[in-house]
Amino acid sequence: GERGGAELPSWVNTLKEEGSLMRAENPPQKKLTFDIISIQLYETYSHANYAILHQRADPSSYLAQTVNRLTKGWIVNFATDDEPAVKELGMLRVRVHARQLVLGVANAWAGVGSPVKALYLSPLQLKMAYNSLLLLSLPLRGFMFWSLKFEGTPLVNSTTPLYMAAALNAFLRVRPTRALHTRAQTHKYSHTYTHKSERGGGEEARESVVVLDVIH
């Protein structure tokens, strides 16, 4: 079937023919629509901002709960939709696969204002959260940050430049660690760092990546 010109996954028709669409919890493997889904923790007055800054939630615990919810997903009743092609899907679990999931954080521009509009999590907090995710067997594809424009900019009330690309790489170990001192170096390094991490492998990515940004 089709909706808006986009074909439904082949396994939908297969399951429909077998009469097991409603009972299928583990449909056959299919190509994912999006290579990367970024959960933007830094967006203005996000849920993460409120939970961590106002409800005093521990960042590691909050991120673990968030990753757990997203990767487990939710059961969605498509049978209530008015579109016949969608209605036929019935009850399905919708989730973000670990190999798609990227947590979006901010560099030095965030963490200002009263109240704070955009959440800033330090490299140390992110490292601790990442280690907690590994211990809990809650994998994710990695992290992204906004924005490259502010790489090398000090935080408010600080004179020390912050290079988030290097800070993330220090514990993700996507590339050999090296010091960054100039904006030009940061631009080059950040680009290759991001490009390398998109595939999670040793070879350079040679195909386009479809990204879905989500505010959280």
Image (tube, rainbow, N blue to C red):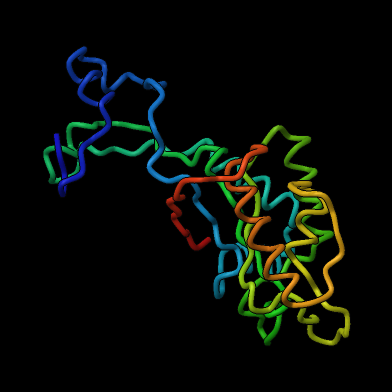
Residue sitting at 68 percent across and 66 percent down? 188
Residue 126, quarter of picture: bottom right
| Residue 50 in view, yes or no | no
Q: In the rendering, at what x and y percent does residue 106 appear?
A: 66, 69
Residue 193, quarter of picture: bottom right
Residue sitting at 52 percent across and 43 percent down? 100
Q: Nearer the viewer, residue 210 or 66?
A: 210
Tell me if 100 is positioned left or right of 131 in this view: left
Tell me if 141 is positioned left or right of 52 in this view: left
Vertical placement of residue 158 versus 91, above or below: below
Q: Nearer the viewer, residue 204 or 210?
A: 204
Image quarter (top left, top right, bottom left or bottom right) of the N terminus: top left
Q: Going by the picture, which residue comes out furthest to the top?
A: 18
Residue sitting at 77 percent across and 54 percent down? 169
Q: Nearer the viewer, residue 112 or 208?
A: 208
Q: In the rendering, at what x and y percent does residue 14 appear?
A: 23, 18
Q: In the rendering, at what x and y percent does residue 176 appear?
A: 82, 49
Tell me if 117 is positioned left or right of 168 in this view: left
Tell me if 109 is positioned left or right of 18 in this view: right
Vertical placement of residue 129 versus 49, above or below: above
Vertical placement of residue 171 versus 214, above or below: above
Q: Nearer the viewer, residue 121 or 82?
A: 121
Residue sitting at 39 percent across and 36 percent down? 75
Q: In the rendering, at what x and y percent does residue 51 appear?
A: 65, 63
| Residue 209 in view, yes or no | yes
| Count of number-bearing discs | 0
